[in-house]
Amino acid sequence: MAYFDQTTPEFPICSWQISLPLTAVTVENVGTGISFIRNIPAGDYWGYNPVWNGIESVANPIDSLIGILAQTVEDILNLDFADPGLPQLVGKQNWVVNPGSTYLRPRIEVAAGFTSADYLVTVPVPEVFGFSPTGETLVQLTGLLNATYNSSGYFSPYNETVLDDRKNTREIYQRESSFAAPISTNIWGVTKTRRVLSWPFVYAAYVYRYRRVLPVFADAAKVLSDDPNNLLENWIEGVADGRVTRVFQDEASAASIAGEYRFGVVVGDPLRDTSAALEDVSGNGQIFSTTIEIIDQGTVDAV
C-alpha cells in the first residue's frame, strides 16, 4: 500500500530529536553593532514538527529546533533590545526548489509586528540550525530570516517514488479453565505493527556524507555539497539507540492541527549493517534503493 501518492515529493519527512547542549544565541543589530545573548536550554528538540498556528500557516513549536530558536530570538528583540516594532516570530520550514539545489529550508518569520532594524543571528553550532558559519540575517524589509542549508533532525530525499507497506499481525491469546476445559483462543483483531518505507531510487548524496561533499554526486542530486544535513546516514545514527522517529505524511492544517504523521522505532541496528537498508541499484555507488522497517507505535491524524 502506498500512502504518499498525493504528497510526494515533499513527503515523507522522517523526523527525530536532536540532543542540544546549552546553546548561546547572539543577536546583533546590523546598524549599531549592539548585541545581546540568550541561551537555548539543553534538551531534545525535533528537527521537523509543524503545527497549525490558528491563522493561515504552520509553524514549529518550541519543542523543535527552529521553533525554540525563533522564540529565543524574539525574547532578545523584545526584552533586551526593546524593539519598538514588538515583533512576534515563528519558526517555519518550506521546500526550496532551485535549478542547482533543493532543500527543506528553515526560516524565521515575523508573524506580527515588525523589526526596526536588520538583525544578524549567530549560534555556536550553525550546522544544526542550517545556518552558514557567519550566521543569518533577519531582514527588516521582508521580515524573514532564511537559512542557507537544511537543519538537523530530518530525512527527506525529495523523491517522487515512495512505497509505504504495512505488515499486520493478529493479537491472539489463549486461556484454559481450572476445570480442564478445552483451551479457547481469542482474537482481538488486526493491529498494524510493522511498517516498511522504501525509496526505490535515492541519490548517493542523500545517503552518505562522503558522497555529499563530492560535487559530482551533489550536483546530480541537486543538493549543496557543503550541506551536512538531510542524509539517510544521519537519520540512521539519530535513531540507532531506539529513539522514536516521526514519519510525516502531510502538512499541518486547520483540520489536522499537527502535521499528519505516524511514529515508531526503527527495527534492528542498520547503523552497524547498512546492507540491511541499502542496495546499490546503479552498480557504481551513485543511486541506492533504500528500505527502512519501523515498529509502528501510533498515529497523529494520519493513516
Image (cartoon, rainbow, N blue to C red):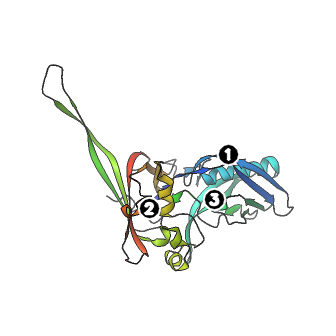
Is 293 situated left or right of 190 in this image?
right
Label 3 or label 2, whichever lies nearer to me, is: 3
Disc 3 crowd, CA 10 A, few/some/many (<14, 14-19, 20+): many
Residue 219 seen from this side: yes
Residue 251 seen from this side: no
Q: How far apart are marks 3 and 1 (CA)?
A: 15 Å
Amino acid identity at mark 1: Pro
Residue most toward the right?
32
Q: Where is residue 244 in the image (x, y as percent from the top left)?
A: 47, 48
Amino acid identity at mark 2: Thr
3 or 2: tag closer to the N-terminus: 2
**Secondary structure beneath label 1:** loop
The image's mark for residue 41 is 1
1 or 2: tag closer to the N-terminus: 2
Amino acid identity at mark 3: Phe
Q: Distance between the residues labelled 1 and 2?
A: 34 Å
Disc 2 crowd, CA 10 A, few/some/many (<14, 14-19, 20+): few
Q: How far apart are marks 3 and 2 (CA)?
A: 25 Å
The image's mark for residue 282 is none
Q: Mark 3 points at which residue?
A: 129
Residue for point 56% across, 73% down: 213
Residue for point 57% across, 73% down: 225
Q: Where is residue 248 in the image (x, y as percent from the top left)?
A: 47, 54
Residue for point 67% across, 61% down: 126
Q: Mark 2 points at which residue?
A: 7
Is 182 situated left or right of 23 in this image?
left
